[in-house]
Each structure stands twice: as C-alpha cells, then as structure tokens.
Image (cartoon, rainbow, N blue to C red):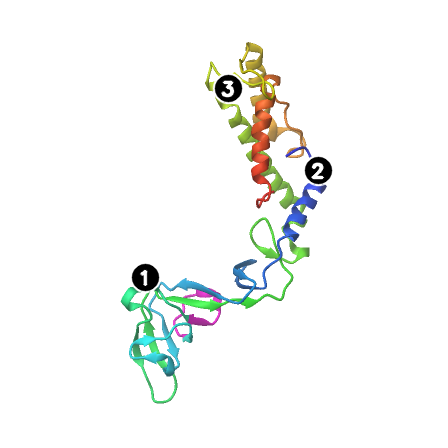
C-alpha cells in the first residue's frame, strides 16, 4: 500500500466490485443480502425453531411421514423465517427417527391435511432467478452499479483508512522483536552477514515506531506517505511488508 489519492482508491474499489457480478440464482434476504448463489437453481435450507403447523397435499402423506422436497402451506410461520418464500420439506438428519415425521391434526376427505412438524425440522426455499444486474460490494451486499457504496467518497475513505490503520498496526508489530530482544541481529541487505543493532539504529527504530503511532493524526490521512524504514532494518522490514502484500493478492481486499 503506497500513498495514493481518493480518486485512485475509488477507481480501484469500484473495479473490484464490478468484477463480482451476482450469480444467476440466489435467495434474496433483504437489505442487499443474497445467499445460496449459484449458476443453477437449488435449495436454501434452514431449521425451524418451533413446531410448524402446515397444510399439505394428502398424496405426499404416508401415515405420519411426509415426503421430502414437497410444497407446504405454513399456518404459524415465524416472522422472517426463510424470508417469506414458498416452503418445501427437507430432510433433517439431526432429528433421526423423527425426520419428516408429523402429527396429523386434520385429514379431511376433501382438501389438504393439516399437520404439525417437530421443532428443529428443516425447510427449504428454492433459489430464484436474479434478473437484476447486481454486483457485490466490499460490505458483502449486492447493488446495482449506480448504487454501489464504492461510488461514495465517504465509504471509500473509511474503508481505505481502516486498511491503512491495519497495515500501520502490522508495521509496528514487525518491529517488536527488535525492541524486545537486545541481542537480535539483522541482515541489512540480501545475503548480507547478520550484525547487531547499534545505538543509532535503535534510536532510529524508536523514531520510526512513534511516527507509525502518529500516522492517523497526520494531515491528509489516510492519503499520506509511510514513514521511512530505519536504514539498518529497511531490508528486513520491506520483506515483511512484501509478504503481506503478496498474501492480499487475489483476496477480497486486494
């Protein structure tokens, strides 16, 4: 992470978001959240915490057992359960012998049977075709391109500020052993013989650590340059920074 501008960061974040288009199918959970994303239709399964009462077609009922993946009409559905979509029965291994077992409350000659499922029974909803052109923001939610938070100066500045603070903390941690271990030696360049730190090196190290601590108060933060490494530690500290940067490559915050 080097010094950059807000415009550059916005472009970087927006490009990243636009590289994450939504899949063809998913279950919209509200407030921009989508789960069970896939290129093909499938089920999203959730356990119900209450004894669910529902109407079912009698042809799916055999004794006190109901078939799997058949539609039901819930009568006492908990608010928000499975986001209001049509429910389907689904196998629940944790219920063992009680899996898909129901108490038959009513079984009229005409019409559907009324049954009660055990608490903990799982129910599924089918993922829906997503026709909107949506993209995933760094906040994990999906938006149209125009509504992406990455278009906002405030969102981008806050996100970048958090990233710089995290890297600042990591750079301070990078130097902890040089402070804690009086006999520590360093390699001042690639392949160089290790040598002890001198008093001037330790003074430069403390100056560097204090500059990192003060970084968030610098004018223009987070769009500020990093403090220069102490000369004696520059090679080793750059290696640590580069290792973190390599780990970020291809990651969500890359």
Q: Are marks 2 and 3 in contact (CB under 8 Å)?
A: no
Q: Residues within 10 Å of mark 2 (few under 14, many from 20)?
A: few
Q: Residues within 10 Å of mark 3 (few under 14, many from 20)?
A: some
Q: Position of residue 93 (x, y in %)?
A: 33, 63
The residue at the point 68 percent across, 41 percent down is: 9
From the viewer's perspective, is 160 left or right of 7? left
The residue at the point 57 percent across, 44 percent down is: 251
The residue at the point 60 percent across, 59 percent down is: 22
Q: Earlier in the sequence, mark 2 or mark 1?
A: 2
Report which residue position mark 1 lands on. Answer: 94
Residue 41 counted in the magenta span: no
**Res 34 seen here:** yes
Between 21 and 31, the residue placed more toward the observer is 21
Residue 66, located in which quarter of the rendered image? bottom left
Report which residue position mark 2 lands on. Answer: 5
Q: Secondary structure at mark 3?
A: helix
Report which residue position mark 3 lands on. Answer: 178
């Amino acid at each position: 992470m080097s010094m950059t501008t807000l415009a550059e960061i916005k472009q970087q974040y927006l490009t990243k978001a636009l590289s994450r288009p939504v899949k063809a199918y998913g279950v919209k959970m509200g407030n921009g959240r989508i789960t069970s994303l896939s290129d093909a239709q499938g089920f999203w399964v959730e356990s119900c915490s209450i004894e669910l009462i529902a109407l079912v077609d009698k042809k799916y009922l055999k004794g006190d057992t109901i078939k799997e993946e058949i539609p039901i009409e819930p009568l006492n559905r908990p608010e928000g359960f499975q986001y209001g979509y049509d429910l389907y029965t689904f196998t629940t291994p944790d219920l063992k012998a009680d899996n898909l077992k129901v108490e038959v409350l009513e079984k009229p000659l005409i019409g559907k049977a009324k049954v009660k499922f055990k608490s903990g029974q799982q129910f599924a909803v089918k993922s829906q075709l997503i026709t909107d052109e949506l993209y995933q923001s760094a906040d994990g939610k999906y938006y149209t391109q125009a509504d992406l938070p990455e278009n906002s100066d405030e969102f981008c500045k806050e996100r970048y500020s958090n990233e710089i603070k995290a890297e600042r903390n990591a750079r301070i941690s990078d130097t902890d052993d040089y402070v804690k271990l009086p006999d520590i030696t360093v390699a001042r360049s690639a392949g160089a013989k290790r040598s002890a730190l001198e008093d001037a090196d330790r003074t430069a190290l403390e100056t560097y650590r204090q500059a990192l601590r003060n970084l968030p108060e610098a004018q223009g933060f987070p769009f500020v340059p990093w403090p220069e490494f102490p000369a004696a530690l520059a090679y080793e500290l750059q290696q640590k920074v580069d290792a973190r940067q390599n780990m970020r490559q291809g990651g969500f915050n890359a």
